[in-house]
Amino acid sequence: MAVQVYLDGKYVDKDEAKISVWDHGLLYGDGVFEGIRAYNGRVFRLDEHLRRLYDSLKSVHIKIPLSRAEMKKAVLQTLRLNAIRDGYVRLIITRGKGDLGIDPRKCSKATIIIMADKIQLYPQEYYEKGLKLTFASTRRNISEALNPRIKSLNYLNNIMAKIEAIEAGYQEAIMLNAQGFVCECTTENIFLIRDGILTTPPVWAGALEGVTRNTVIELARKEGIPIREELFTGHDIYIADECFITGTGAEILPVIEVCGRTIGEGVPGPSTRRLLAAYRDITTREGTPIHEKESLTV
Ligand code: PXG
């Protein structure tokens, strides 16, 4: 059976899952989204992702008829229909069909899409050897213009930075905020470790409040690693003992070089490896069961 996509309350075959060219998600990037993962028959941090989705919707003033509980059911149903135990869920909500003007009042019904598919994992080598990063000259959107805490369909800011990374021969780029402080990468949050202290920029600096970021903060507390949410600069990364980036797709990716400077020993550091092991452990054990009968495999 073809991949089934949830589209406005109905399930349709992958190739039949189409939206109108009048949809403001397409015309203006007027909408929000979420990327969620399922591991071992469980959806990891589903409530946290849905909370962020509904916060984003509230902020951009898009109303949908589905409650958070109904959305949760629809996500689980989409995974069940596609027989996915390990995979990726993408939720997309746009302001819906309108006319050619930006006026949101012309869009009477939001478009709701849920896609679930197998996930394209990052190469194992990235986790074993670590990544090399560069800085993008493109600054992260300022909160006063489009708050980066909203996971909106307007990703051009990040895409411009990603293009810079690719053109310079890197996988990823670090984005600074308008004041020149480190913010995040194009689709990952960033952490550094120096003298045993883990630091990540505060979300008010202009980063997305990553679900993985929050999980890592929680794990660090459990592991007894002191954690601070503080502003830092590129210099602090150069002189860090360890650095890593986090995201739903990436999980925890060690960083071993930034702009030609070797970070620490130039290999994934011990705290990074410890946190990655702890992260891998909870992703397979915690989460919302896709099937009711799924029992904890502890
Ligand atoms: N910052 C930005 C700008 C992001 O887009 C993150 C941080 C990490 O957030 P989470 O909640 O995933 O820990 C993101 C994540 C993916 C994917 O498949 C992730 C994002 C966008 C597109 C794909 O991992 N955003």
Image (spheres, rainbow, N blue to C red):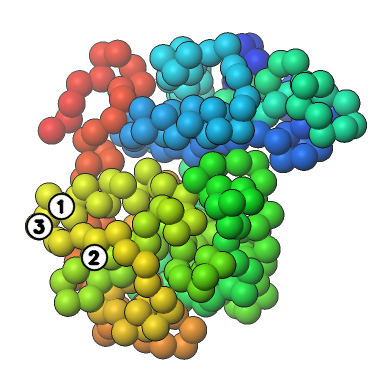
- Inspect the image, locate mark 1, and give the three-letter code of the amino acid beneath it: Arg
Q: Is residue 157 above or below residue 93?
A: below
- Inspect the image, locate mark 2, and give the three-letter code of the amino acid beneath it: Leu
Q: Mark 2 — residue? A: 198
**Is residue 250 among what the camera can see?**
no
Q: Where residue 100 sits in the image (x, y, percent)? A: 90, 31
**Is residue 207 among what the camera can see?**
yes
Which image quadrant is residue 131 in?
A: bottom left
Is residue 222 toward the left or the right of residue 22 in the image? left
- Inspect the image, locate mark 3, and give the three-letter code of the amino acid beneath it: Gly
Q: Secondary structure beneath disc 1?
A: helix
Going from the N terminus, do you reach mark 2 or mark 3 first?
Answer: 2
Going from the N terminus, do you reach mark 2 or mark 1 first?
Answer: 2
Q: For the residues marked 1 and 3, what is the alpha-carbon distance in whole angstroms?
A: 5 Å
Instruction: Determine whether the beta carbon of the residue marked 2 sits less than 8 angstroms from the nearest atom of ligand 1.
Output: no
Q: Mark 1 — residue? A: 221
Who is closer to the viewer here, 12 or 105?
105
Q: Where residue 169 sits in the image (x, y, percent)? A: 60, 77
Q: Where residue 34 sits in the image (x, y, percent)? A: 51, 36
Q: Is residue 15 above or below residue 197?
A: above
Who is closer to the viewer here, 65 or 293?
65
Q: Is residue 154 above or below residue 18?
A: below
Q: Where residue 190 sits in the image (x, y, percent)? A: 39, 63
Q: Could you tell me which residue is drawn at 62 percent across and 74 percent down? A: 137
Residues marked 2 and 3 touching at CB (< 8 Å):
no
Mark 1 Cα shell of 10 Å, populated few (<14), some (14-19), many (≥20): few
State which quarter of the image contains the C terminus. top left
Q: Could you tell me which residue is drawn at 41 percent across and 29 percent down? A: 51
Residues marked 1 and 3 touching at CB (< 8 Å):
yes
